Amino acid sequence: MTLEMLVMWIVVGLVAGWLAGFVMKGGGYGLIGDIVLGLVGSIVGSWIFRALGVSRGAGLLALIVVAFIGAVLVIFAGRALGRRRGYARA
């Protein structure tokens, strides 16, 4: 992994985390939490799309969309697990 790829991955994760926190109202984890979820989501989204055989070779916007979808899924899973264990947020 080159430095350029690492920086792009971090920027995409930042944008995806911010978007996911904005869209998933009532379940944001704060700016830092949303950014971390965006980074995790970019990994999850990339893995899911690769497993489905969907190519993301369309550039930066495609990377952001994939990371955003992954971040939303991570937030949704976190909420579902939190409710199941009795840690639901108000």
Image: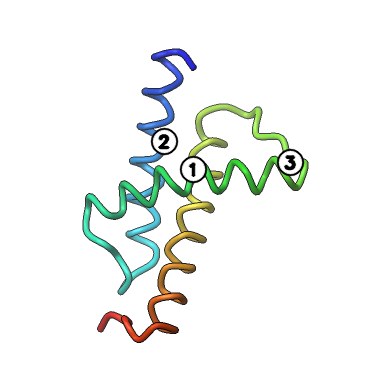
Q: Residue at x 41, y 35 (%)?
A: 12
Q: Amino acid at mark 2?
A: Val
Q: Residue at x 73, y 45 (%)?
A: 51
Q: Residues within 10 Å of mark 3 (few under 14, many from 20)?
A: few
Q: Residue at x 45, y 20 (%)?
A: 5
How much space separates mark 3 and mark 2, taking CA atoms?
18 Å
For label 1, the SS is helix
Find disc 1 in the rendering and name its residue.
42
Q: Earlier in the sequence, mark 2 or mark 1?
A: 2
The circle drawn on residue 12 is 2
For label 3, the SS is loop
20, 85: nearer the viewer: 85
78, 71: nearer the viewer: 78
How much space separates mark 2 and mark 1, taking CA atoms?
8 Å
Find disc 3 in the rendering and name its residue.
54
Quarter holding the C terminus?
bottom left
